[in-house]
């Protein structure tokens, strides 16, 4: 029987470029505001390891988390979720 991969067993090999870009966007806003991972953990009420995994793209931010962060950061959610379109190959 096949089981779907859960967030708990994902590793660095499983980094999705979209999740990684969103993590980079969040990290940029954290830097702008002088926040660290512990601050982000307090905002989202999750542990530091979970924050690290979200920022590196191993697991994704939940939509509700992005909404909460956008409000906290004073930016539109779209800024955190902005991901360049993939290049089209012929």
Image (cartoon, rainbow, N blue to C red):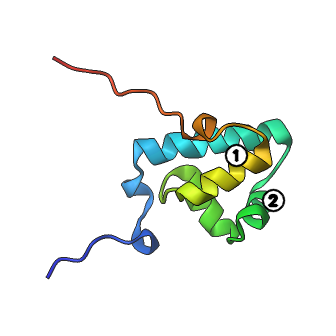
Q: Is residue 7 above or below residue 14?
A: below
Cα–Cα span, label 2 and label 1: 14 Å
State left or right for residue 21 relative to residue 86.
Answer: right
Across the whole image, how many numbered discs are drawn on residues? 2
Which residue is at a point 27% across and 72% down the rendered structure image?
Answer: 4
Which residue is at a point 41% across and 66% down the rendered structure image?
Answer: 10
Give the image location of residue 27, x and y in percent: 68, 43
For residue 39, the mark is 2
Query: Are there few (<14), some (14-19), or many (20+) residues within 10 Å of tag 1?
Result: some
Task: Indicate the quadrant containing the N terminus: top left, top right, bottom left or bottom right.
Answer: bottom left
Q: Is residue 37 above or below residue 83?
A: below
Query: Are there few (<14), some (14-19), or many (20+) residues within 10 Å of tag 2?
Result: some
Mark 2 or mark 1, earlier in chain: 2
The secondary element bearing badge 1 is classed as helix
Give the image location of residue 21, x and y in percent: 52, 39
Residue 31, picture quadrant: top right
Give the image location of residue 85, x and y in percent: 39, 27
The secondary element bearing badge 2 is classed as helix
For residue 70, the mark is 1
Residue 40, picture quadrant: bottom right
Residue 18, picture quadrant: top left
User: Furthest residue to the right?
Assistant: 34
State left or right for residue 1 relative to residue 16.
Answer: left
Task: Indicate the quadrant containing the C terminus: top left, top right, bottom left or bottom right.
Answer: top left
Callout 2 touching callout 1 (CB < 8 Å): no
State left or right for residue 13 relative to residue 34.
Answer: left
In the image, which is nearer the foreground, mark 2 or mark 1? 1
Which residue is at a point 38% across and 55% down the rendered structure image?
Answer: 13
Which residue is at a point 40% across and 48% down the rendered structure image?
Answer: 16
User: Furthest residue to the bottom?
Assistant: 1
Q: Is residue 22 above or below residue 89?
A: below
């Amino acid at each position: 029987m096949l089981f779907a991969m859960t967030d708990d067993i994902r590793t660095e090999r499983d980094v999705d470029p979209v999740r990684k870009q969103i993590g980079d966007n969040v990290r940029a806003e954290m830097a702008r505001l002088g926040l660290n991972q512990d601050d982000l953990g307090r905002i989202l009420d999750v542990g530091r390891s979970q924050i690290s995994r979200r920022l590196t793209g191993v697991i994704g931010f939940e939509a509700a988390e992005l909404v909460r962060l956008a409000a906290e950061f004073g930016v539109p959610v779209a800024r955190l979720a902005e991901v360049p379109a993939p290049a089209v190959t012929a």
